[in-house]
Image (tube, grey):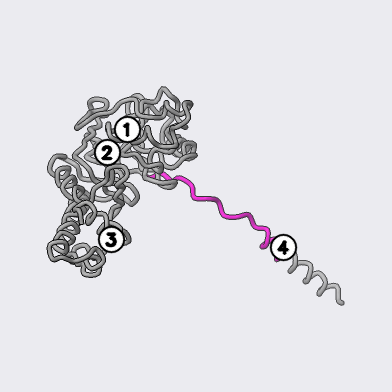
Amino acid sequence: MKRGMVLGLIFGAGIAVTQAWQPAPPPNVAQIEKVKDNLYMITGGGGNTAAFITANGVVLVDTKNPNWGQAILDQVKTVTAKPITHIINTHTHGDHVGSNEFFPAAVEVIAHENTGANMAKMPNFADASKKFALPDTTFKDKMTVLRGADAIDLYYFGRGHTDGDIFVVFRGLRTMHAGDIFARKGTPLLDMNNGGSGVAIGETLRKAAAGIKNVETVIPGHSTVMTWADFQEFGEFNRAFLSAVQSAVKAGKTADQALADLKLPETFSAYQMTGAKDNVTKIYTELGK
């Protein structure tokens, strides 16, 4: 065999081996994007985390899945050297409270009282060494964290995704983090085990839209940044969904028939409907059917 051919074969084999042993692509990592001055959204690893830089530190809204605390902190460090001072949890799910334990016990954790009770039942916090990651402060209807330009208003209007969903409003920035009661444009997850309600969610969203003032930008639980009009529309979607199911019940239809005949206004044609079957079934159960 000629020398050139041998070298060619060796070179080709080297490429094949190199290609075969390429390292796997890195896992999904957290990414940070600016929403407003001093307010950032960190994506990846579960629910959207908000990082609000205040005069004395950083307030986080939600902490993603377990083992994502360092990823959150690394992203925060790209925009400020200030310490984390507060964590606000929008609701009880592990992809929103999972990395609470990463942060020091001195960090104040805040949530709705129902979320506090729900979190206390989670396996994540069963070990006594992790109790510090449960809420230090809870509230019933409304609470304000910090003051002046740093003021953050927390609102609770009723059951929806769970029975503890709150709306976190960065007052001076006219921006709200809605958690998973507004995760994306589509059928919401109704966690009945934690007090969720397909019958109540539309009314809860209506109360929020009426009761919260001066918001123009919304951070959803699992989607890109949206507008206040998007949030209002999502409430309309849930009320239209409930109305369609109630009409099916009144007509004597089964849940399966209600699903097959489900028709919503064209306005919602782009909404993800992957949870429609589950939500119809749950609403039928709530209505005693």
Tell me the kind of residue under disc 1.
Answer: Ala
Q: Is residue 5 among the parts visible in the rendering?
A: yes
Distance from the alpha carbon under mark 1 to that under mark 3:
29 Å
**139 lies above or below 160:** above
Label 1 to label 2, Cα distance in Å? 9 Å
Location of the N terminus by quadrant is bottom right
Cα distance in 3D space between marks 3 and 2: 22 Å
Name the image quarter holding residue 262.
Answer: bottom left
> Relative to the observer, which residue lies in front, 148 or 158?
158
Q: Quadrant of residue 209?
A: top left
Residue 29 on the magenta span = yes
Q: Which residue is mark 1?
A: 117
Q: Earlier in the sequence, mark 1 or mark 3?
A: 1
Q: Residue at x 23, y 34 (%)?
A: 154
Q: Nearer the viewer, residue 155 or 31?
A: 155
- Can you see residue 229? no
Residue 47: x percent and y percent? 37, 45
Q: Are marks 4 and 2 in contact (CB under 8 Å)?
A: no
Measured from the top left, where is residue 282 in percent x and y?
A: 26, 54
Kind of element beneath mark 1 = helix
Q: Nearer the viewer, mark 4 or mark 2?
A: 2
Q: Specify the amino acid type for callout 4.
A: Val
Answer whether labels 4 and 1 touch (C-beta < 8 Å).
no
Of mark 4 and mark 1, the one earlier in the sequence is: 4
Give the labeled residue for mark 4.
17
Left or right, 122 with reference to 204: right
Q: Which mark is residue 276?
A: 3
Neighbours of disc 3 within 10 Å: few (<14), some (14-19), many (20+): some
Identified at 18% across, 60% down, the residue is: 245
Span of residues in magenta: 16-33
Q: Amino acid at mark 2?
A: Gly
